[in-house]
Image (cartoon, rainbow, N blue to C red):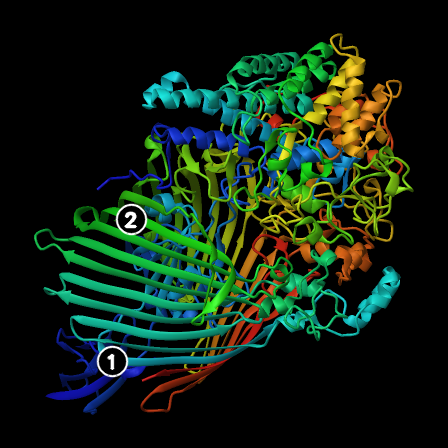
Amino acid sequence: CTDLDLKPEEADVDAVVFQDPASYRSYLAKIYAAYTLTGQQGPAGRPDITIVNDEGFTSYIRAYWKAQELTTDEAVIAWSDAGIRDLHYQTWSSNNQFMQVLYYRVYYIIAYANDFLTQSTPSKLSEYGISAADQAVIEEYRAEARYLRALAYWHALDMFRNIPLITSISTDLPSQATPLEVFEFIETELNEVEPQLPDPMSNEYGRVDKGAVWMLQAKLYLNAEVYINESRYDEVITACNKVFGGGYSLHNTYAELWMTDNDELANSEIIFALAHDGDKIQTWGGTTFLVHAAIGGSMDPALYGVGGGWAGTRTTYGMVEKFGDTLDIANMDPRNFFYTAGQTAGINDVATFEDGYAVAKWVNISSTGEAGVDPDFVDTDYPVFRLADAYLMYAEATLRGGANGDMNTALGYINMIRERAYGDTSGNITIGEMDLDFILDERVRELHWEGTRRVDLIRYGQFSDQGVWPWKGGVKEGVVTSSHLDVFPIPASDLNVNPNLKQNEGY
Amino acid sequence: QSRSVTGVVTDSDLGGGLPGVNVLVKGTSSGVVTDFDGNFTVEVNDGAVLIFSFVGYKTEEVTVGNMSHIVVELQLDAEELSEVVVIGYGSVEKKDVTGVVASVDSKQFNKGVIGSPDKLLTGKVAGLQINSSGDPGSSTDIRLRGVSINGEQPLFVVDGVPLDKNSGTVGGRNPLNFMNPNDVENITVLKDASAAAIYGARGANGVIIITTKSGEKGKMRVSYDGFYSISRFSDNKVPIFDADTYRQVIIDKAPQEYEFLGDANTDWVNEVLQVAQGMQHNLSVSGGAKDTKYYASVNYLDNQGVMRKTRNQTTSIGLKLNQSLFNDNLKLTLNSKTGFVKDQFSPNVIGSALRMDPTRPVYEENSPFDGYFQWGSPNEALATANPVSEQDLNDQKGKTFRSLNSINIDYRLPFVQGLSVEAVGSYNYSKGEYDAVASEFLKSRYINERGVGINDEEATKKTKLLETLLKYHTELKAIDTRVDLTGGYSWQNFRQDQTKFAGDSATQVNGKYVSTDTTFFDLAPLENRLISFYGRANIDIKHKYLLTFSLRRDGSTKFGEANKWGMFPAGAIAWRIIEEPWMNWSSDLFSDLKLRAGYGVTGNQDIADYKYNTFYELGDQFATYQFGNEYVRTLRPIGVDPELKWEETVSTNVGIDVGFLDGRLNVSAEYYIKEVNDLLFNVAVPAGSNLSDLVLTNIGKVRNQGFEFVMDAVAVDSENFSWDLNFNMSTNKNEVIRLDNSAFDPLFGGYDDRNNIINGDVGQTIRVLKEGESIYAFKVYEQIYDNTGKPVSSSNPLDMYVDQPTVDTDNDGILDSGDGVINDNDKVVTDSPFPFLMMGLTSNMRYKNFDLSFTFRSNLGGHVYNNNASSMGYFDLLTETNVTNNIHESSYETGFKTRQLHSSHYIEDASFLKLDNITLGYTFSQLKFARIKAYVTAQNLMTVTNYSGIDPETFTGIDNNPYPRSTTFIGGVNINF
């Protein structure tokens, strides 16, 4: 007897799996899930990424948020995981595990999307015996997969800049593309999938539609000067205008955007959200991280719908100042979620949770005060894009010379945001007050702790060699740093195995 | 004048008559054989001399004189007994061994509280490292001839049946606990590839062959062994502050907290430990008639751990039946070893006992946590939980049943002289259950209002084996050559099914907790199969030149079509110089002189199943993604290397065996090189080129090389006093030669050892795999010391740690300057955790009826990372997590304010000398009806080391709150009827 044919009982090869149309839906769900979950077992176990030690770290949103927030004035973290302090001190190296996670997550999603697109070509579908009706559905999935791949490429371009551009899985060593090539790839892909995706707010919850395309276009073009040294502000305004025509509206209560029922209440404003659920979508990353990490000191975790805090994230004085008189919390901009009892405004020791105000923006309670289904795993969804950001981008692009923008329209949008915040027109500004610096600060007030600050600071030239905030550069008062830090290093682990790659300058 | 003489031959060791002894009248060919009771009657002439001989015993000559009844006591011949050595699929005479084979028999085994057969060997075999924690019935980590990266455990073979030792057990501690160590007759370790290659794909880490006891012809023998033991934590050197000193520390370093301190004086470590008791009762019955031999045993071992609420209870039953038929031409062996094991577990609370504030009491009135003191306010969620409550409020039990059954048929074929056929069939079944109940008053459950928690697991494993082999022996007289040929086929199938569920808010129904809020976890069954063909030739030319060749072809389900089958050849030669005529001059000096050289290829397939093809697997119900109102289970491909194949270990060995003084002193020396080629490693693939960040592939190469020296000596051998000594020593040097297809970024810090996370922070590691370094060397910041020799403590890392060259200022490709920043790039790969030199010394002394034996063991040159010091040796910990915590005493030596997990300061020399075992016994030989031996044993009595922590001996080089080792005192008796 020489029979050596054994097969796993709960998995199979592509030729078998993809005969079932439901597999394509499950595979697409994986590409979405890969943006926040960490593996095939919730909350941990059977991880996707294994190059770093702690599976919880490998959540895309958790890593992305750290990269966009901890590197800026908006957040510090008390923990001492290897390399985490280097984010706020801007002393990261090419062996930094948080940079590694981002890089490998980006390419993980790209690889899955590439494989999904290979497995779902019309000829493959016919080969697998998929019916015409199912083929039409899968065609829509393909557009979404391409969108999710473009989104990952945008993150890669933004953070690592000089990156391989890969559109199919191959054992050939990938080689670096120019930023322009990557930029144009994203641009082309978005243009091609736009007509194929459902109209705004018409897809199933959790899936992307045209609105997500327009938001990503706006983001890409707004930062085009950074990426490819070219201003593309007209296209920002065009994309934003499409968003405005999409039927979205601001949700009336700002705080409810980060509550457990944001999927139902605020879905008119949230253009694309990553779904979380304390029971069925469990992770130690995602919003579970965002809620728990921000709770410590004298904060009562139950008030935020969780069993305990992780005593990690706070903000710096640099951000607090943007909200008004720091001695007069009560009269600050109402969009602040500062928790000050037992906390100091300044930070003597980054490792002490009580140093720096806590920010209780992300919570695991509903608009009616009910805690989420689980004290450990948070229900709140993560808004990737929302309407208020489009208003701010429109105003900024107009101020930066976008020819098709209108200053008064921009002012109107800004004041809509502020009226929602203040509940009345008391916070409204005049056209004279609306300059680029105001927009940058307003983005802090409106979008703080939503993972956009690093991109904004770099666009304004304030991230490294200009701009100072507490503990930047590892010094309490803060110092300016080298401009090469605007781009993250390619992880040494990839340079080590791929001689085609060249490290980003300065590392 | 011929007359009749009667007599009886007895066994000097066991008393009792010895059947089957040849009684020969010297100078004649006439003689008789003793009957079942050892009696004989023989016709002799006056002045005759009788020669009594029996295999395994020293031959005696007795002059009859005028005696009419002769009583002869035959002495066991230790040398004779060890003459036959078990090798894979057969045995050879010791003098004919060509490979490196260490054989340890029951007399040399470790004594004391030993739950599984593997622990019998600790310290006994050169190059074999056996490590177990202090947990009762704990599992062992075994390493033979150096270190590798994948599955280092050797293959276990019990009476011809390969066992799956590696895969973990649900509900139990050590999968070998089902086997009664008292049933073991002999353990043979095949160390080099020339010997182990007959086990092909599983031989890379050596083979440990366990032979169990069989009955012997003669009267029924009944034997009882029993002991009672007491164990306590082996060291009082717990490096934390007692309550009074702690109060001073608080005044010194955190005076603002002083007023909040409690008024208790609690020794938390003492609170979680206990003085443990143990006992064993072992009863065996054996005997045999002409064609039938039987052996049966029952053993009960009850062993508490020094950590409260830990216990291991094993009942095992061993049976073996040998039946000869058709004039010994057909031999049948039935073998069954069954164990019922009950384990009680405790969460490892040593870490929290070290850290818990000693001014707080264990219990507190009106505490909502069921009366236990607890840091329980909402902002104290991260504070340490009361370790005593963690022990008391967790009920974790395991139950395993394992049964190994085999039948062996050996048939000497009648039509061809020297040809026999053997068949082995075996069924190995195990079932493990784990059953845990967590009280609703546990801190983590109480604050999350989760109610009583239940957690149940069950695993069933079935291994089926079928082997057939042919053996042929022939002698070519013309060229004075003997040839033994063996060829066989083997089929082995392994399957495991597992279920697991957990629930909250459980309630008690009929004494058992049930939960309506239960979650079932999907656990895929595991199944793999190995099919093999093998052959071996042993050739003996003129008793001088010995040749062995073997070849095994293994097929495994773990690999893809192109690589399912692997070939493992081996060869060895030995030259018995002592047999050369020109060596005759030396017969007074040497009793043996043999040179050996061997080469072989063995494999390792100890990896997960199905890693050769891109399988798409569904995620579980907690890792879904929401599409509208549907929670869609996700489908993920697994990135693989379709070319995946075996790891191959190529090893070369040269050795020499020398016997002196008529065999009273035997010395062996070996030199070996072991290279793992095509090492299976989860290597980083170029991002985007595969479906995963790391892919398991055959890429690495590691090398182990070393020297081994073994000495056996009979120092004294007289009637009243005898003294045997065994000394073994081995060196090993290991190196990672290659790990990936690297372009080698000089800044690349290596691959972190993700399997051994250190304490003190989430997901931190200290060991690394890097080319050119020792396997799993430590990777640390190089600590700067001030001129008093104290480590510098500063808020600026540049003052504390060397800023390693990470910048190439003159563009010559060499990093020559620091970058003014201390970050991950400044960690350097330093010392190896593994000892360079390991030694073991066993002594057995007998003086009249007293015997004394002991085993010393020493490791030199390894390093240990003092993780207790690094994770707790800093002053900020005093007030971390919003409460007061105890800290490690080393904080006053280092002055560290903040945690410095990766300082080179915490890497210490791990050299040690241990007295593993010492036994004093007395034998009551006067008794007629029985032979009684009483003994006292102390296990782990003494450790000599410079290491500042509790125990320098770790398998990984990381000292992080392992289960505390205990010192055990045993009083026992052994009765043979």
- What residue do we see at 17% from left, 53% from top? B421
Q: Residue furthest top?
A: A403
Q: Is residue B774 left or right of residue B652?
A: right
Q: Is residue B884 found left or right of B532 in the rendered image? A: right
Among the 4 quarters of the image, the one containing residue A445? top right
Q: Position of residue B923 (x, y in %)?
A: 42, 85
Q: Amino acid at mark 2?
A: Gln
User: Does A241 sit left or right of B428 as displayed?
Assistant: right
| SS type, badge 1 | strand
> Label 2: chain?
B
Left or right of B781 on screen, residue B962: left
Relative height, residue B965 to residue B827 (above, below): below
Label 1 sits on residue: B220
Discs 2 and 1 lie in a common subunit: yes
Against A388, is B197 above or below? below
- One can see residue A287 in this view: yes
Name the residue beneath numbered marker 2: B492
Check if mark 2's residue and mark 1's residue have beta carbons within 8 Å.
Answer: no
Q: Secondary structure at mark 2?
A: strand
Q: How many marks?
A: 2
Q: Given the image, on which type of amino acid does mark 1 rest?
A: Met
- Of circles 2 and 1, the one toward us is 2
- Determine the CA span between mark 2 and mark 1: 37 Å
Residue depicted at x 58% and y 59%: B450
Residue drawn at 71 percent across, 58 percent down: B383
* A506 in relation to B886, above or below: above
Point out residue B28 in the picture as x, y percentages from the top left corner.
14, 75
